[in-house]
Amino acid sequence: MAKPIPCDYRLVDFGQGRKLEAIGDYLIDRPSPAAWGSLTRLPERWGAAAAAFYREAAQRGWSYQQPWPESASIDCGSFVIAARPTPFGHIGLFPEQRASWEWSDERVRELGESEVLN
């Protein structure tokens, strides 16, 4: 497996039913029901998205301006979570569970285990 990109997940912007996220320098635009009723704050950043997911009938699925990096991962210290696009618009991890990642990292370090089942 390729070495993970040494980075954190970041929520870059949010609004108009979508969220703009980053894994390293790779920007991802995808739907977010929680973003309805909010306006984006950084409209100039959205055009730089490398990948976007659409659920509309006219366009459904991922659209890529740049290929998804094979090594896109979140380095959580004692373990790595791979980030991969799915046919449903997910990226293989749920950033809102970051506290769980940190807790898991602490437990793995305490136990000295090398493999963890999510």
Image: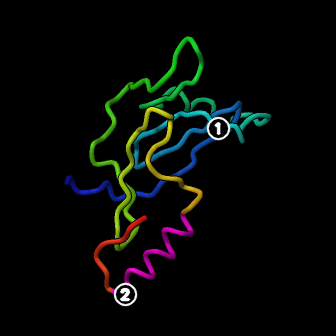
Q: Which residue is mark 1?
A: 32
Label at residue 111? 2
Percent across and percent down for residue 8 are 45, 58
Q: Amino acid at mark 2?
A: Leu
Percent across and percent down for residue 26 are 40, 41
Residue at 54% across, 55% down:
95
User: Which image quadrant for residue 58?
Assistant: top right
Marks 2 and 1, how far apart at CA? 37 Å
The image quadrant where one finds the C terminus is bottom left
Residue at 50% across, 34% down:
88
Residue that protrudes farthest toward the top in the picture: 58
Residue that protrudes farthest toward the bottom in the picture: 110
Camera-side residue of 33 and 8: 33
Question: Height in image: 71 above or below 61?
Answer: below
Cβ atoms under marks 2 and 1 closer than 8 Å: no
Percent across and percent down for residue 57 are 58, 14
Percent across and percent down for residue 70 are 27, 43
**Span highlighted in magenta in the image:** 98-111
The image quadrant where one finds the N terminus is bottom left
Question: For the residue carrying disc 1, how many other residues have a C-alpha within 10 Å: few (<14), some (14-19), or many (20+)?
Answer: some
